[in-house]
Structures are given as structure tokens and as C-alpha cells.
Amino acid sequence: MPQTAENYIAVIRKRVALNYWLYLPKDLAPGARYPFILFLHGAGERGDDLELVKKHGIPKLVEQQTDFPFITAAPQCPSETTWPFQLDALNALVEHIQATLPVDPARCYLTGLSMGGFGSWALGAEYPERWAAVAPICGGGNWLNGFPERVQRLAGVPVWAFHGAQDTVVPLEQSQQLVDILVNLGADAKLTVYPDAGHDSWTATYANPALYNWLLSHRKTLG
């Protein structure tokens, strides 16, 4: 008896899990919507201890002040992987936060340092429609699948990258190459180089109010 072939459609879902640190501004006003930052930490903070997430960057800053105006989420990357391989999970986390907290979808911002800088480039390019602005710090993309060409997907998103000229962990050229691609496309992209800084170009960056003013100056045009 002859066999028959048929076409099928299957919807396959997978479950993702990420622990994350969350900050909410004080005295949230009923009905108000707030700007949101997704912060991606570096390789040294991976694991299952959320206290590590507060070692550097925005979580550390927020621990020292009480008037940070952004809803902020800082997920923790599992120890056996890196951010560029967690893009689906990160996107699912942002969708969850937007659905459950008073986030302004026009003011969603992405930043990260070192491994989180790589993650910021990758996540921004994977979901450019989600971000009003992206600020990668001492990151790059040369070892990521499809980079550097894939960064062209960020041409419609303002990008401000930061890097130390003396960085021996992630060479300055990693940021420079990606910013140059965007600039050559006429995109709103710029790179700040700290002449005397090594790999730690994040302390000065996250302590600078100009970064947060720049983020808030950008809004995403929604459908």
C-alpha cells in the first residue's frame, strides 16, 4: 500500500529561566509609566548568587543612591554560558517586565559592560525594534555569529559606546569597528574613548549623569 506524505505545522515553545535583580523608583504614581533599563553584567558575575550582580555598574550605583529614575532589571547569566547565547531568555524577561510593571515601552534602554557589552550589541541587533537607545561598554562583536555585519540592524537605534584605550581584555578596535559601520550608514552612533583607562571603562561611564540624560533624550516611535 503506498505511503502518503502530509504537511504539518507545529508550534514549539521552550521554557526559559533567569534570576534577576530588580529596582523600582520610589513612590510610583498610579497610572504613570517609567523609563526602563536592562543592565547586563560582565563574565565575573555569572552564577546563581544575585549579590554578584551588584558588584559593578548600575546595580552598584543604585545601592548608593535613592533617586534613580529608571525601573531597572539586571539578570544574572548562568555560569556555563554568555549573554549572546541568552538572547531569547533576555527578550522574554523584558516582555515579562513590560507586561507586569509600569514600563513606558517608548523609553526602554539597553546597556552592559564587558560580556554585557557584547550582550548589548547582540541583543540590540537581534531586537532593534525594542530599544530607544543602546549603550555598550567595553564590548564588541567579532566573535559573535553574523557580526560585524549584523550590527547594521541597529542603524535605526541611537548607540553610544564606551571603551578604554588601554584595554587589554577587549581591544578598543572591537567597539570602534561596530561604531564605524553604523556611522558609515548615517546612523546616530558615537564612541567615547577614555585615553588612560584599561578594561574598566564602566565606572566612569555609569557615574556620569550625561549618560542617563542622553538615554532619556531618546524615545522609540511605537507602531
Image (cartoon, grey):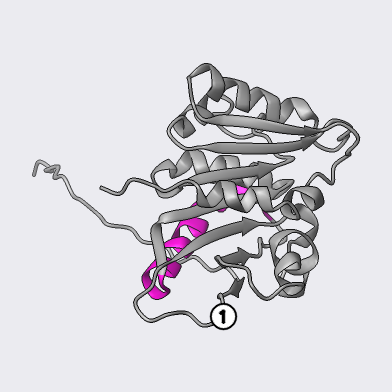
Point 48% across, 20% down: residue: 186
Point 61% across, 27% down: residue: 179
Give the mark count. 1
Q: Is residue 89 left or right of residue 50?
A: left
Q: Looking at this view, is 174 or 84 the one in front?
A: 174
Query: Which residue is tagged 1?
Result: 26
Q: Is residue 202 left or right of residue 151?
A: right
Q: Quick check: 118 above or below 183?
A: below
User: Would residue 36 be visible to someone looking at this image?
Assistant: yes
Point 66% across, 23% down: residue: 177
Q: Provide residue 102's location: percent of width, then percent of height.
A: 41, 72
Q: Residue furthest left?
A: 1
User: Crowding at label 1, few (<14), some or many (≥20) Cα neighbours within 10 Å?
Assistant: few
**Residue type of the residue flagged with mark 1:** Lys
Question: What kind of secondary structure does the magenta stretch mostly adopt?
Answer: helix
For the record, the magenta segment spans 81-102
Magenta-colored stretch includes residue 28: no
User: Would residue 85 be visible to someone looking at this image?
Assistant: no
Q: Provide residue 63's location: percent of width, then percent of height.
A: 74, 73
Magenta-colored stretch includes residue 91: yes
